[in-house]
Image (cartoon, rainbow, N blue to C red):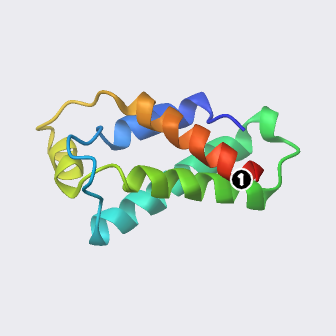
Amino acid sequence: MKIHQLTKYIFLMLVLIANNSYAQLTGEIRRNFVDSALQSCYNNQRSSKINAKISDQLIYDYCKCIAIYSANVYTNQLIKDMESGKRPMSGISEIANSAGNYCGKKLAK
């Protein structure tokens, strides 16, 4: 299953690639990010004609995986800086592609 193009842009609007790959989102920022990313991904994947025969549960599992994968890459400070406009958005498509590839393979097992 490929990540829907619109989902990539939603991720682009939400976060910026982390400079510090070992730091992860934590606390309320993580919960809010995962909830928002999961809902956006699910809505976009469910509305895509290519996924018409895919179960709601599989789409949910795929999107949850993507949201958690992404939350493990981004940092709290990065999200705060992006929300405040201190940092421009760039590089998100690479993370979205990596998340989509990882989660697609994980769920195919």
Q: Is residue 101 left or right of residue 67?
A: right
In the rendered view, would you say 15 is above or below 37?
above
In the rendered view, would you say 95 is above or below 39?
above
Name of the residue lying farthest toward the left: 86
Q: Could you say where residue 102 lies in the image, as x and y percent from the top left? A: 58, 44
Name of the residue lying farthest toward the bottom: 27
Q: Could you say where residue 32 lies in the image, as x and y percent from the top left? A: 37, 63
Residue at the image position 72 percent from the left and 41 percent from the top: 47
Compare residues 63 and 19 and report the one nearer the observer: 19
Q: Is residue 39 visible?
A: no
Secondary structure under tag 1 reads: helix
Q: Is residue 61 left or right of residue 5?
A: right
Compare residues 54 and 40 and report the one nearer the observer: 54
Residue at the image position 57 percent from the left and 56 percent from the top: 65
- Rendering quarter of residue 48: top right
Compare residues 46 and 22 and report the one nearer the observer: 22
Locate the N terminus and report the quarter of the image it occupies: top right
Q: Is residue 27 visible?
A: yes
Residue at the image position 25 percent from the left and 42 percent from the top: 18
Residue at the image position 20 percent from the left and 40 percent from the top: 19
- Rendering quarter of residue 71: bottom left
Task: Identify which amino acid the numbered label 1 is placed on.
Answer: Leu
How many neighbours does mark 1 have within 10 angstroms: few (below 14), some (14-19), or many (20 or more)? few
**Residue occupied by mark 1:** 107
Name of the residue lying farthest toward the right: 53
Q: Could you say where residue 85 lies in the image, as x and y percent from the top left? A: 15, 38
